[in-house]
Image (cartoon, coloured by chain):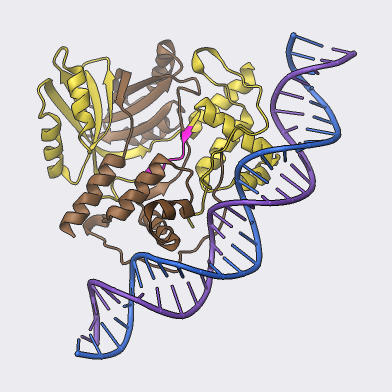
Chain colours: A brown, B yellow, C purple, D blue
DNA sequence: CGTTCACTGAGCATGTTGCCCAGTGAATAC
DNA sequence: GTATTCACTGGGCAACATGCTCAGTGAACG
């Protein structure tokens, strides 16, 4: 079931695509790029050869597009998507933190040491930081929060427990949007 | 550079592992599982064969572990990680929505139609829903929010724009934690 | 004490990859 | 207008990884 992508050095393919780069590091992707990403999202284990067959283009083309999408940074990688729930962490929560002036760096470093902190953002608005937490249970969430706020510098933490996840993290609609925009604008 | 995972039906490998399943669909993973996931996270394009070499175990073992991790649901997939910023959406924001009683389902359906909504959760606490948005610019964020709140049922929306992302979405520390817990408990 | 199970190490046919090449049409530059 | 560049096609070849199978081993389990 788990097949592979041979480990390889892998230089850029013979082709180099006339990349359309917009302002600010933005990369324009066309419809074919969009289809490649969508196909890859739907069937991650598909091969370049199989993709070229499905998309009706030459293998080299898919190869080149993929290389470009990766060196572009559009596709950051293919890391395994691990489900925290399956690991025993079925509870997800978002915590808004208020930080004491100048303690930002300390808090950031501290948060990075807590495994249950899956991501951390600094934001505008009421809070100063927003983080995503997971825990083994609602009760366990208390332990996690205690550990999080166990550092000087966090003035207040406000937690919202996730009940449902109607829209799981997704990117395809945005990719299609971006591909269509490219078609229209050029 | 972009190598592959041959498209294949792929039945379970000959081996079936004495799976340790805990209460509530939780799967216990051991140290080897942890190393596999970590290795895969670090070098997603590595092959089963290469992994077995690096980890010092037989190819079949890695194959079987990986199959199990996937059928377990611990590894959900290997979808491409697309960077919204590279696509021209460098602005990320979190919006807290307050929903009018009974309008939840309508709002959920509506949110799913907005490409810039990357994820949506229903939560406890002050707000009723929390969503992650992206936009082409701060100005564009207004357009996105307008589109989001363009449905009856959203009483109030409070938005926090992300400035920095000190801890990007990660899972490895949790995986290691889970692997260690397994070692200790059983 | 026999069975089950995870794992090893080996093998083989098949299929994919990495890389190369010549040729085409279209957009770009001179 | 003409030459060049570039994305893409379709073909080819050697090297390699995969999918699947098999026999054997040690440890945990009933």
Snapshot quadrant of residue B156: top left
Indicate yes or no whether the magenta region holds residue B78: yes
Snapshot quadrant of residue B121: top left
Where is D1 relative to A20, above or below? below
Magenta stretch bounds: B76-82
Snapshot quadrant of residue B148: top left
The percent position of residue B44, horizontal first and vertical second, equals 51, 45
> What residue sits 23% from the left and 59% below the top?
A22
Nearest the camera: B48 or B6?
A: B6
The percent position of residue B22, horizontal first and vertical second, equals 56, 15
Nearest the camera: B23 or A53?
A: A53
> What residue sits 38% from the left and 38% below the top?
B168
The percent position of residue A10, horizontal first and vertical second, equals 52, 60
Nearest the camera: B182 or B4?
A: B4
Indicate yes or no whether the magenta region holds residue A98: no
> What residue sits 43% from the left and 19% below the top?
A90
Query: Is B49 placed left or right of C21 in the picture?
Result: right
Q: Quadrant of the N terminus of chain A?
A: top right
Query: Is B1 placed left or right of B96 in the picture?
Result: right
The percent position of residue A12, horizontal first and vertical second, equals 45, 64
């Amino acid at each position: 079931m788990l097949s592979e992508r041979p480990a390889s050095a892998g230089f850029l393919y013979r082709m180099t695509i006339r990349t359309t780069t917009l302002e600010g590091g933005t990369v324009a992707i066309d419809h074919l790029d969009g289809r490649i990403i969508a196909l890859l999202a739907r069937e991650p284990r598909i091969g370049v050869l199989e993709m070229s067959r499905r998309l009706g283009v030459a293998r080299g083309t898919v190869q080149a597009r993929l290389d470009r999408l990766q060196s572009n940074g559009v596709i950051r990688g293919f890391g395994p998507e691990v489900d925290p729930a399956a690991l025993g962490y079925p509870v997800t929560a978002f915590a808004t933190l208020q930080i004491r002036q100048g303690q930002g760096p300390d808090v950031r470093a501290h948060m990075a040491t807590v495994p249950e902190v899956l991501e951390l953002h600094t934001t505008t608005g009421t809070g100063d930081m927003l983080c995503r937490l997971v825990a083994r249970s609602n009760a366990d969430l208390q332990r996690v929060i205690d550990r999080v706020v166990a550092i000087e510098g966090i003035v207040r933490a406000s937690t919202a427990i996730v009940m449902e996840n109607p829209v799981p993290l997704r990117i395809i609609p945005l990719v299609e949007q971006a591909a269509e925009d490219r078609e229209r604008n050029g």
